[in-house]
Image: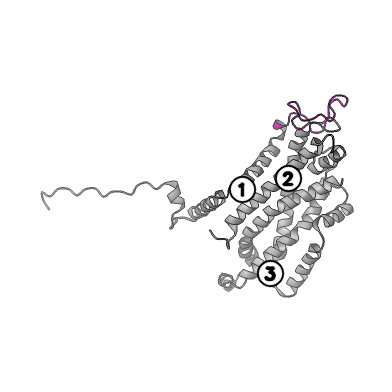
Amino acid sequence: MAGSPPLPPIPTAAPVGMRAWLLSSEPSSRWQARLGRGYLGWRTFSRNPLAVIGLAVILLLVFVALFADVIAPYSPIAGGDLRTERLLPPSALHWFGTDDQARDIFSRVIYGSRITLMVVMLVAVIATPIGLLFGTVAGYMGGWVDTVLMRITDIFLAFPRLVLALAFVAALGPGIENAIIAIAITSWPPYARIARAETLTIRNSDFIAAVKLQGASTPRIILGHVVPLCMSSLIVRVTLDMAGIILTAAGLGFLGLGAQPPMPEWGAMVATGRNYLIDQWWVAAMPGLAIFVVSLGFNLLGDGLRDVLDPKAAK
């Protein structure tokens, strides 16, 4: 109307913060939805202080392994003067002392983290796909395929992991590469069992039936729909198994079947230090402490990931 005062401007919504954007109940894109799920997972994970400690230990292991050349003050292989620097106790010059070859134990522990990280990564890369393939195929196909694959799995599960790894290493020969192969061969059966159990719960689901009606082949259903749903449980189990993998590798090194001298492998270092356990305790205690801390870190991290990734856990 003529002469009427102008209408006030319509107030605009206040800027949405990042947290509100991540927690939006109506995400505008798939990327936003994924980021929101990741943020919720991190909130659940961070509520567990022990899990955060475990993550910090593993990140420290990765950092030390990557920058071992910078962190280690001495060579892990070359020793000092055997007359004056052999079996020295921990001091400001040698933080963890020296061993029977006058080598700095701190430097050897630092470089040994590379071997430990390499073992757990390669075993996970080798064993996880094998177990995932066996389990998903057996659970989805059923029948005689399930029977054959699970009986093979039962044969591997019938032997203790370390005993079976010893048998494979004895057949392949000592060495870090053969030790990794032996540990991977003995690590996949539990993953196959978990993948099979997960597959049995989803193979008759409605969305699987819908995919079949669309003409998807069996390999496409297994790889594209069944495997992704099994990954969360498998990631938790693999993380929890890392401690056992480290202990198995250390056990093989302790028996002289893993990494060979002069490689700074923690299990082999403990084996060397057992001869001096009474008087020079640090030779075996320091690498043993490293094994304990890293194994504990993986266990704590696995517990935290289970809280985040387990769909059956209460949120």
Q: Residue 254 at what x, y percent from top left? A: 84, 45
Name the spot of residue 207 as percent of width and height, x first: 56, 70
Q: Amino acid at mark 3?
A: Gly
Query: Which residue corresponds to the image point at 75% horizontal and 68% vertical from the top-left?
Result: 150
| Labelled disc at residue 292 | 2
Q: Position of residue 58 (x, y in %)?
A: 66, 44
Say whether disc 2 or disc 3 marks the residue closer to the N-terminus: 3
26 or 109, which is in the foreground? 109
- Answer few, some or many: residues within 10 Å of disc 3's Cα (few below 14, many 20 plus, some between 14 and 19): many
The disc label shown at residue 139, or none: 3
The residue that disc 1 covers is 50
Name the residue furthest front: 278
- Residue 65 disc label: none
Q: Quadrant of residue 77?
A: top right
Question: Which type of secondary structure does the marked residue at label 3 adopt?
Answer: helix
**Which is closer to the viewer, label 3 or label 1?**
1
Q: Residue at x 80, y 62 (%)?
A: 156
What whole-number distance in Å separates the C-alpha atoms at marks 1 and 2?
15 Å
Q: Is residue 206 left or right of residue 181?
A: left
| Image position of 105 with respect to 200: above or below | above
What's the amino acid at mark 2? Answer: Phe
* Residue at 69%, 61% in the rendered image: 132
In the image, farthest residue toward the bottom: 143
Magenta: main secondary structure equals loop
Magenta span of residues? 71-96
Whole-angstrom CA distance, mark 3 to mark 1, is 35 Å
